[in-house]
Image (tube, helix red, strand yellow):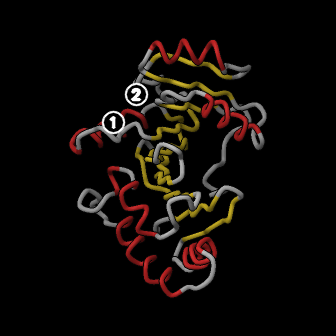
Amino acid sequence: MAAALTLPPHAVAVDLGFGAVPWTSAEWLTSLRGRWPEVRLRAVDADPARVEAARQGVEVEGMRFEVGGFDLPPGGAHLIRAMNVLRQYRDPEVPGALAAMAAGLAPGGLLFEGTSDHPGDVLAAQCLRLDGGAVALEGLLLACSGARGCAPALFRDFLPRSLRRGRDPTGAAAALLSAWEPLWRQEAGEPHERILRSASALTGGMAWHLPAGFAVWWSPAP
């Protein structure tokens, strides 16, 4: 995952559809600045009331809250985060929405798009990279606090819309979870230990035990 997150020193990040809790945007900026101190953040939402409240509450230097949607300035963002943005979209609308988001990326830029539950205990996000005008899947990030359990099957309902069974033409994400499940069942020990060992056994997979749970990064075969 660290290899995927390579940004220029003065990168522009966009939190697209920050929603009702703008402090998550501020937390993300703090996290990014731990590695890229000069990064700037644009937090965008379609609700003017939310944007105004965020400006009064959590806006800090290098961060700007804006009213807007997918119509980002072309080529202006090095990193876009769009969590829970496409959850309510109909299947035929998803490819166009992803293309609109990706149009805001600078060459080589990254789009993280996915879904989490409301408390953030379960998360699944795809990483898409803009390369030569085309957007390609670079990897899949799966994270869980353990509050709802730690089985691989937990992620099925949180996969990005374009990667769910029957919607992904490659079937890669469904195949990943199907391959992971028997590996997980073979492991013993604490729940997080089973997840980490079984995830590390996956081809293209890396896993970390974090203070608030665990994260798995999986890259598709080239």
Q: Secondary structure at mark 1?
A: helix
Query: Label 2: which residue?
Result: 70
Q: Is residue 182 above or below residue 47?
A: below
The answer to whether residue 139 is seen in the rendering is no
| Residue 50 shown left or right of residue 94 in the figure | right
Q: Quadrant of the N terminus?
A: bottom right
- What is the distance, in whole Å, between disc 2 and disc 1 at their CAs? 7 Å
Q: What is the total number of numbered labels drawn onto the structure image?
A: 2
The answer to whether residue 20 is seen in the rendering is yes
Q: Amino acid at mark 1?
A: Ala
Badge 2 density bin: few <14, some 14–19, many ≥20, Cα 10 Å:
some
Q: State the image coordinates of residue 166 (x, y, percent, origin top left).
A: 23, 61
Q: Residue 151 or 196: which is nearer the viewer?
A: 151
Q: Secondary structure at mark 2?
A: loop
Residue 97's label in the rendered image is: 1
Q: Amino acid at mark 2?
A: Phe
Q: Residue 144 or 168: which is nearer the viewer?
A: 144
Q: Is residue 203 above or below residue 18?
A: below
Q: Which image quarter: residue 179?
A: bottom left
